[in-house]
Image (tube, rainbow, N blue to C red):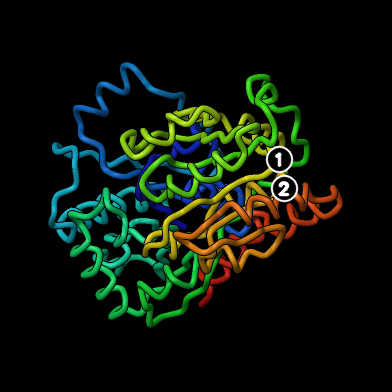
């Protein structure tokens, strides 16, 4: 098989603790007994950037795995051009050379890159499957490429290529004509068997300890979060994750019982934070991007046995479990109160959830799709 990343490299995926769905998929393919040999394709890097990183690497190279080969294509420019058709063609040619070099014969292709999924010819390969782990046609940082993605999806449909999407809405945006499946996000059970003790700084916060974990960006409804914090003045609302839009959170940060811990946090710390929360929140706005999500944080909250207060979006409602819903754009406070009254899941219930929602189970379905004759 061949797997290609969209937003990161294999080394970065491992260094950040396999925090995102494409990271998990690459890891699953690398360890699957159904995959004899695997080429992992990193996105393009500029030759100058790669030279600097070889001298001063930002993170260690992943441990080698038998039968797994990493391909790093280089070019002069750093950013993708608007014409993704041409750059996808050049990338595919470099990928083909890597496949020949490592002796793969007509490999099945799984790509997380929407442009490559549509514009790649792949007449030298087996079936092509696009892994849609987000709706990139609604992602503001990718807005300049939206027309290119739409064109790529049209070509994907013409070719009848396969699609595995994380939600019904993400699948509907692509509207595939070939074989397809919904493969929601999941969790790695081994990470969640023992929740451990919460970090000292978190354990010292006044209760109830309310927690949001995820990227700190415009998808968070700060008005809802502010109202929740004010409804629990003796407790604490903590938001943890990479800060992508500081101005969006300026008003919320002024609330006396709100704590914002910006930055990337190790996987083990995320587990311990969730395990120490009294309730976890998903105060998202409703838009195309959030409607297409399979919220990874929701599965992690439930893996930690925490009750969840969330906005009523289709992927969230479909997950089931100990989730109290509120209208998107409405008042989240009643759902938070119900979640706090509900309390944590009994341990047997939590352990069953881990096994039923494991990444390994999710990706077996994707492999069935990608490897079918």
Q: Which mark is residue 278?
A: 1
x%, y% of residue 320?
Answer: 67, 65
Question: Does residue 57 appear in this view?
Answer: yes
Q: Which residue is drawn at 35% across and 53% down?
A: 100
Question: Does residue 105 appear in this view?
Answer: no
Viewer-proximal residue, 250 or 130?
A: 250
Which residue is disc 2 drawn over? 340
Q: Residue at x 44, y 59 (%)?
A: 329
Viewer-proximal residue, 187 or 214?
A: 214
Q: Which mark is residue 66?
A: none
Of discs 2 and 1, which sits in the foreground? 2
Viewer-proximal residue, 98 or 311?
A: 311
Viewer-proximal residue, 197 or 88?
A: 197
Going by the picture, which residue comes out furthest to the top?
Answer: 56
Q: How many labels does the image show?
A: 2
Q: Residue at x 38, y 82 (%)?
A: 177
Q: Is mark 2 on a helix, strand or loop?
A: helix
> Would you call the spot at circle 2 few (<14 residues within 10 Å), some (14-19), or many (20 or more)?
many
Q: Residue at x 48, y 60 (%)?
A: 330
Q: Are marks 2 and 1 in contact (CB under 8 Å)?
A: yes
């Amino acid at each position: 098989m061949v797997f290609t990343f969209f937003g990161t490299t294999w080394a970065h995926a491992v260094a950040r603790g396999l925090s995102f769905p494409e990271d998990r998929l690459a890891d699953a393919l690398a360890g699957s007994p159904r995959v004899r040999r695997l080429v992992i394709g990193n996105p393009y890097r500029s030759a100058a950037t790669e030279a600097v990183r070889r001298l001063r690497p930002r993170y260690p190279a992943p441990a080698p795995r038998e039968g797994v080969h990493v391909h790093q294509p280089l070019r002069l420019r750093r950013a993708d051009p608007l014409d993704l058709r041409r750059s996808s063609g050049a990338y595919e040619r470099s990928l083909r050379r890597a496949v020949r070099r490592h002796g793969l014969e007509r490999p099945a292709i799984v790509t997380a890159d929407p442009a490559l999924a549509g514009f790649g010819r792949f007449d030298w390969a087996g079936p092509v499957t696009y892994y849609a782990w987000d709706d990139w046609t609604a992602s503001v940082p990718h807005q300049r490429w939206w027309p290119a993605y739409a064109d790529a999806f049209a070509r994907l449909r013409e070719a009848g290529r396969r699609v595995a999407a994380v939600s019904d809405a993400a699948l509907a945006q692509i509207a595939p004509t070939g074989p397809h499946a919904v493969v929601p996000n999941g969790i790695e059970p081994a990470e969640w068997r023992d929740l451990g003790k919460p970090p000292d700084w978190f354990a010292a916060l006044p209760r109830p300890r309310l927690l949001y974990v995820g990227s700190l960006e415009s998808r968070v409804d700060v008005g809802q979060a502010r109202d929740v914090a004010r409804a629990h003045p003796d407790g604490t609302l903590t938001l943890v994750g990479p800060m992508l839009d500081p101005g969006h959170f300026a008003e919320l940060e002024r609330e006396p019982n709100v704590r914002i811990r910006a930055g990337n946090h190790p996987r083990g710390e995320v587990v311990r934070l969730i395990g120490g929360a009294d309730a976890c929140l998903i105060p998202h706005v409703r838009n195309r991007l959030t409607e297409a999500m399979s919220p990874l944080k929701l599965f992690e909250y439930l893996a930690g046995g925490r009750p969840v207060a969330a906005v009523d979006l289709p992927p969230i409602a479909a997950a089931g479990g100990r989730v109290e819903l509120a209208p998107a754009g409405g008042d989240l406070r009643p759902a938070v109160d119900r979640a706090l009254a509900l309390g944590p899941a009994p341990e047997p219930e939590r352990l069953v959830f881990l096994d039923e929602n494991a990444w390994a189970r999710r990706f077996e379905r994707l492999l069935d799709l990608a490897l079918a004759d």
